[in-house]
């Protein structure tokens, strides 16, 4: 089968690899009907040390179950399924707590251990716990929005939940990538009164407004902080969604939070140390977040996708086949595309 293999920074190739096959009796094999490229895939795209073995990329997908192992009970051949970016058993204490990204038997797709889904097919460990079947046709018009439930919409929602967004809250979203845009959707859905997006790209800002952003701050650093203060009566935001992962974004996020506010971070941190520790301390700001338990959030978000209340699929502004995935990485990295959908 064909798959996307990354060999190092800027080196993405489409290659023939051994077919995905059942290894454990709890596995399933899914034919990928739609996958996508994640903002977090751009970190290795920019930084990965060259390797000879490469890594099959992709952790967001939707597809059709082709085969199941002998111990798979709930998932059946022919099911249309959402594949969350982490696999999980669905039975351990953390899965019961709705934190499947910390499953004691779990892990992540698109790593050196478990192949990813920017491919014709993908092996799903712990299929019963991992996969979420949906009762729609594999080519349903809602597919782009359903696909976002595998990561980006769940991640935006997690940022909002971690930042304690609720009715009447003033929310700031740091980052206008696909996750930030989904953060805007989530904030509005949870009842935010004012949503300020910090971003600089005209196409993304337009989408943010469509999704419910009330104000736009396009400056950076201190200028952005002052602008958010001006928009919030000098006090700052109750809830700040950090959707980038760079130190500067985290510093801005903490700086625009009001005393007693909360920062929900979902951008993958690119440094060991967390910046702005002192202002966070002196202003009693809660800092929370991490890898979103997308599997847990599907249940909550799916009805709103199915009835059209939210349309996170609008973050996809380019659709490509597998052969064009290397160019898809380039386009996202060059900020030419917001988010790229792949139809293998
Ligand atoms: Zn578990």
Image: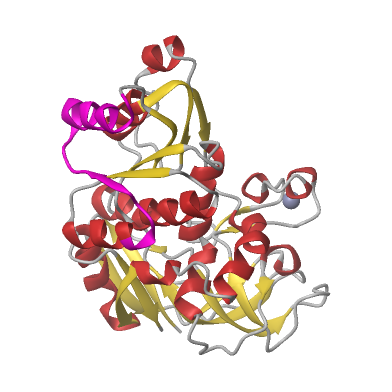
Classify the position of the C terminus by image quarter.
Answer: bottom left
Q: Magenta includes 219?
A: yes
Q: Is residue 223 above or below residue 205?
A: above
Q: Residue at x 38, y 11 (%)?
A: 278
Q: Residue at x 65, y 60 (%)?
A: 300
Where's residue 149, x and y in %? 54, 65
Where's residue 140, x and y in %? 52, 88
**Which of 220 and 127 lies nearest the eye of the viewer?**
220
Looking at the image, can residue 263 be seen? yes
| Horizontal relation, residue 240 to residue 6: left or right | right
- Residues rendered magenta in the picture: 210-233
Where's residue 301, x and y in %? 60, 62
**Which of 210 and 116 lies nearest the eye of the viewer?**
210
| Horizontal relation, residue 236 to residue 101: left or right | left
**Which of 213 and 8 lies nearest the eye of the viewer?**
213
Q: Magenta includes 251?
A: no
Q: Residue at x 48, y 63 (%)?
A: 59
Where's residue 175, x and y in %? 30, 46
Quarter of the rendering containing residue 94: top right
Looking at the image, can residue 115 be seen? no
Q: Residue at x 40, y 70 (%)?
A: 36
């Amino acid at each position: 089968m064909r798959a996307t293999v990354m060999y190092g920074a800027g080196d993405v190739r489409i290659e023939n690899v051994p077919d995905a096959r059942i290894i454990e009796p709890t596995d399933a094999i899914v034919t990928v009907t739609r996958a996508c490229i994640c903002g977090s895939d751009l970190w290795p795209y920019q930084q990965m040390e060259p390797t000879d073995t490469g890594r099959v990329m992709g952790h967001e997908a939707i597809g059709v179950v082709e085969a199941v192992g002998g111990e798979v009970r709930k998932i059946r051949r022919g099911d249309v399924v959402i594949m969350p970016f982490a696999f999980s058993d669905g039975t351990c204490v953390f899965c019961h707590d709705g934190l499947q990204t910390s499953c004691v038997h779990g892990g992540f797709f698109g790593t050196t251990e478990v192949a990813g889904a920017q491919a014709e097919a993908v092996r799903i460990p712990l299929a019963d716990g991992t996969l979420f079947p949906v009762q729609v046709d594999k080519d349903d018009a809602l597919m782009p929005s359903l696909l976002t439930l595998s990561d980006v919409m769940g991640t935006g929602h997690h940022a909002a939940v971690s930042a304690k967004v609720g009715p009447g809250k003033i929310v700031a979203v740091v980052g206008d990538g696909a996750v930030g845009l989904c953060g805007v959707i989530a904030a509005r859905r949870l009842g935010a009164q004012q949503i300020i997006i910090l971003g600089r790209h005209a196409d993304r800002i337009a989408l943010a407004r469509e999704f419910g952003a009330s104000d736009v701050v396009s400056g950076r650093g201190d200028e952005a902080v002052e602008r958010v203060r001006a928009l919030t009566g000098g006090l700052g935001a109750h809830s700040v969604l950090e959707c980038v992962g760079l130190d500067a974004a985290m510093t801005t996020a903490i700086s625009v939070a009001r005393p007693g506010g909360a920062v929900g971070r979902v951008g993958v941190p690119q440094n060991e140390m967390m910046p702005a520790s002192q202002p966070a301390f002196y202003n009693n700001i809660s800092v929370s977040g991490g890898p979103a338990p997308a599997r847990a959030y599907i249940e909550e978000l799916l009805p709103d996708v199915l009835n059209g209340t939210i349309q996170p699929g609008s973050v996809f502004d380019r659709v490509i086949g597998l052969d064009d995935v290397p160019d898809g990485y380039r386009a996202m990295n060059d900020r030419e595309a917001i988010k790229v959908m792949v139809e293998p």
